Image: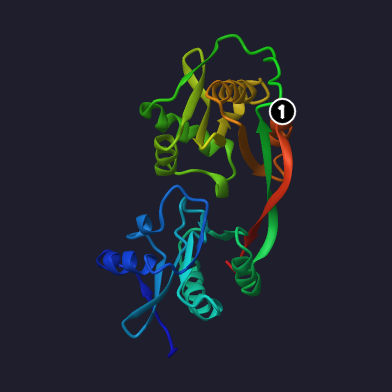
Amino acid sequence: MSELTVRLAEASDFPRLAEFMNRNPLVYRHLDWKTPLEWIGEQPFLLAEDGNDLQAILVCVPYPASAAWIRVFATLDEHMPARTWRPLFAAARDQIRCQESYCRLLALNLQGWFAELIENSGFKTFQDIIMLEWNEQTPIPLLPELPEGLSLRLMTEEDLPGIYDIDRLAFQPIWQYSLDDLNEAFEQSAFSTVALMHGEIVGYQISACSFFTGHLARLGVHPAFQRHNIGFALVHQMLNEFKREGTWKVTVNTQSDNLASLSLYEKIGFVRTGESIHVYQYPGV
């Protein structure tokens, strides 16, 4: 392989990128609602070429602006992925550094080969994502006392702007969803609800389901209404709904230092699976 040329992807590259992905490259994908090619038009979306031959792609779009997750890395060099990773990551890192606002460069340890790449590039673990699971044989506890004026209903598309405002208040910047993320999650959900206090949205949950397995994808409560059993009520209703539909188990994950979430999930019957995912940050950005 000769020296690679790295450049930004353009909209006109779509056919080549689609053909590239169809060649079954070695692929790392972040836990995104978007597919890899849906990021075309956003930057950094970088290509590594050997002459006219596309060899690898790297996507690490800051979205939201404070967090640039490694979203996609795909390479045809399965035996030595570092050969294509190194020039792509160097270009992406430099582009992130040139942003006017501070942005963290982050990645998840979802595949062993990719973890080795990013560790060798200087990424350091700073947090873990804990996996929990509820199964159909676990009794669902009774609802605790709820605040007066609380009601739950199905989520609608019109609720999303208000949910977006709550999401930004309820989560740390690197874990916040964009409005597009929330819309994608809602459209792909199996059961999504909002909690209202006297008619105003104060919390929400978005859950997916596939092959008798549910997943609580998102749970958020406005900080002013936390510790009032609102999150418990949303999860309680979701579990009962999935149980009625014949779902065998429901999964959820949360950060290792999010003690409030861990306490809530364990209180309602979720148990830790023993699995976890390392969260990495690049210290040089």
Q: Position of residue 2 (x, y in %)?
A: 43, 90
Give whichever of 41, 184 is nearer the camera: 184
Residue 121 in view (yes/no): yes
- Left or right side of 262 for 30: left
Q: Report the amino acid beneath label 1.
A: Gly
The N terminus, quarter of image: bottom left
- Residue drawn at 52 percent across, 61 percent down: 70
Is residue 8 depicted above or below 246 in this figure?
A: below
Q: Quadrant of residue 54?
A: bottom left
- Left or right side of 57 for 108: right
Give the residue number, with chain letter if any, for mark 1. 269
Give whichever of 11, 161 is nearer the camera: 11
- Residue drawn at 61 percent across, 31 percent down: 248
Q: For the image shown, how many numbered marks are present on the structure?
A: 1
- Left or right side of 240 for 59: left
- Residue drawn at 52 percent across, 39 percent down: 168
Residue 283 in view (yes/no): no
